[in-house]
Image (cartoon, rainbow, N blue to C red):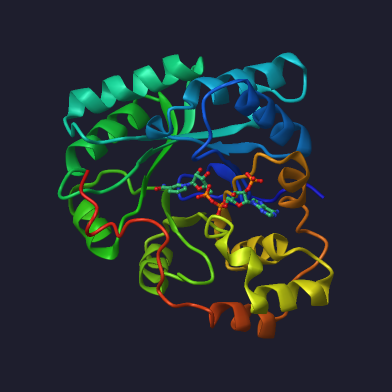
Amino acid sequence: MGVKNIRLNNGIEMPEIGYGVFRVEDGKELEDAVVTAIRSGYRSIDTAAIYGNEPSVGNGIRKAIEEGLVTREDLFVTSKVWNVHASFDKTITDYEQALERMGLEYLDLYLIHWPGQDKYLEPWKALEHLYKEGKVKSIGVSNFQVHHLENLLKSAEVTPVINQIEFHPKLTQLEVRDYCLQHDIQVEAWSPLMNAELLNHDKVKEIAAKYNKSAAQVILRWDIQHGIITIPKSMTPSRIQENMNIYDFSLTEEDMEQLNALNENLRSGPNPDEFDF
Ligand code: NDP
């Protein structure tokens, strides 16, 4: 069964499972992994300027298109602006350079990577400009807390379609999820597997054994049953495939609750309120 789509607040559909490529070096191995992911059925790919691997993601995408696996329109490609230089003009140039690096005509989604300390209002104006000009299909944010979103929405003309945040059973982010739900902003989970740390957790393994699925599959299933888009990363072809095979079972309400109960508000990445690059 194919991956389901979620309709974003601008009417555009986005696959609920995508392929993440953080901490992967630019190069042939990544190009091949992108082709493998597309061959396995992924249609959404998540990269960022700061990952330094947009060229290989772009090469992999073009290879898959050349091989006839998909068309560009079948794919949903995300990248993120590293808003160290927060001016309007710099953000526009960053987008154009991202397209050049990837060899693509447009992105499906462009995100502000981190809010920083007041570093997002001008970049957001630039993203709105790109969106209104039709240069990018959707725009969103990442690592925004409630107060960042409240502040952004005071002056925003376009509501972000997505807030991509760290989310996994040890960090369930109830407050920001609730705010996003109320404002029709889709939540997307980064490090859904807590960068593999959760795969040896006893409770996760116990639930996985019950369904005859892997720990990763159980966590990713938990994501989509919460209505959250998820983007697991793997460079291992068998795991790339495994992480998509989550449509032949569903977690009971009780098991969802047991996973929810693992929350410790524990981050594996930086706290957005303290991280100022
Ligand atoms: P994940 O939580 O996706 O975990 C990735 C790790 O889990 C890798 O070591 C991978 O190993 C392993 N793994 C994946 N699937 C399996 C499996 N089925 N069985 C066993 N091990 C598995 O971590 P990431 O931090 O990469 O997060 C996912 C994506 O989220 C990123 O790639 C990036 O696109 C995005 N992200 C965004 C951030 C932001 O600030 N917006 C921050 C961090 C991430 P292997 O590769 O060896 O198979």
Count the numbered circles shown: 0
Q: Residue at x 22, y 52 (%)?
A: 152
Q: Residue at x 73, y 50 (%)?
A: 244
Decide: is 82 above or below 158: above
Tell me, yes or no, if residue 251 can be seen here: no
Tell me, yes or no, if residue 159 can be seen here: yes
Q: Residue at x 57, y 49 (%)?
A: 231
Q: Position of residue 90 (x, y in %)?
A: 22, 24
The image quadrant where one finds the C terminus is: top left
Left or right: 120, with 103 as reference point: left
Report the front residue among 253 and 207: 207
Decide: is 64 above or below 242: above
Left or right: 1, with 85 as reference point: right
Q: Position of residue 204 (x, y in %)?
A: 66, 74
Decide: is 109 above or below 224: above
Report the front residue among 197 and 240: 197
Report the front residue among 233 and 161: 233
Q: Residue at x 70, y 27 (%)?
A: 35
Quadrant hosting residue 122: top left
Quadrant hosting residue 264: bottom left
Q: Position of residue 166 (x, y in %)?
A: 44, 58
Q: Residue furthest bottom?
A: 254
